[in-house]
Amino acid sequence: MPPHQTLEALLSHLLPADDANALAHALLRRFDSYSGALDASFDALLEVEGVDRTIAGLLKSILPAARAYQLDRQSRMGLLRSPEAVGYYLADWFEG
């Protein structure tokens, strides 16, 4: 999924479709990339027209949630003791 569509999908939980699309593009223009938008500070996000505290909070919650998911998943896998375990681990990084 292209970066603007990924952001749009997230924003569509809080905004009408047209507004989500426009804001996704504005965020990408301002922060140069999807990762830039997610790495931006809460205050920097609020500087983008159309971003309120709720939207900034949603965007700032994505990385901690993804990290918690990844750590949980890795902890359930245990050590990488076989080629198959390494394959499953690496698949997490390339699925999408």
Image (cartoon, rainbow, N blue to C red):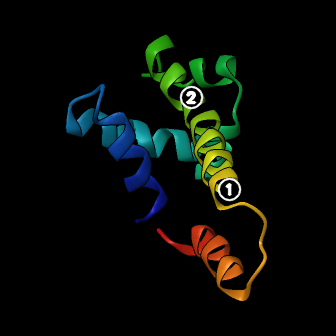
* Residue type, numbered disc 1: Gln
Above or below residue 77? Residue 19 is above
The residue sitting at the bottom extreme is: 83
The residue sitting at the top extreme is: 53
- The residue beneath circle 2 is 61
Asked which quadrant contains residue 85, the reply is bottom right
Work out whether mark 1 precedes mark 2 in sequence or the reverse, and give the earlier one: 2
**How packed is label 2: few (under 14 Cα within 10 Å), some, or many (20 or more)?**
few
Q: Residue placed at 58% from the left, 75% from the top? A: 91
Tell me the SS state at disc 1.
helix
* Residue type, numbered disc 2: Ser
**Left or right placement of residue 42 versus residue 53 in this view:** right
- The residue beneath circle 1 is 74
**How packed is label 1: few (under 14 Cα within 10 Å), some, or many (20 or more)?**
some
Q: Residue placed at 65% from the left, 20% from the top? A: 42
- As measured in the structure, the alpha-carbon distance from the residue carrying label 1 to the one carrying label 2 is 20 Å
Tell me the SS state at disc 2.
helix
Q: Residue 34 shows which numbered tag?
A: none
Q: Residue placed at 57% from the left, 36% from the top? A: 65
Above or below residue 23? Residue 28 is below
Would residue 8 be seen by someone viewing this image from the given angle? yes
**Left or right placement of residue 43 versus residue 17 in this view:** right
Instruction: Report x, y in % for residue 61.
Output: 56, 28
Would residue 49 be seen by someone viewing this image from the given angle? no
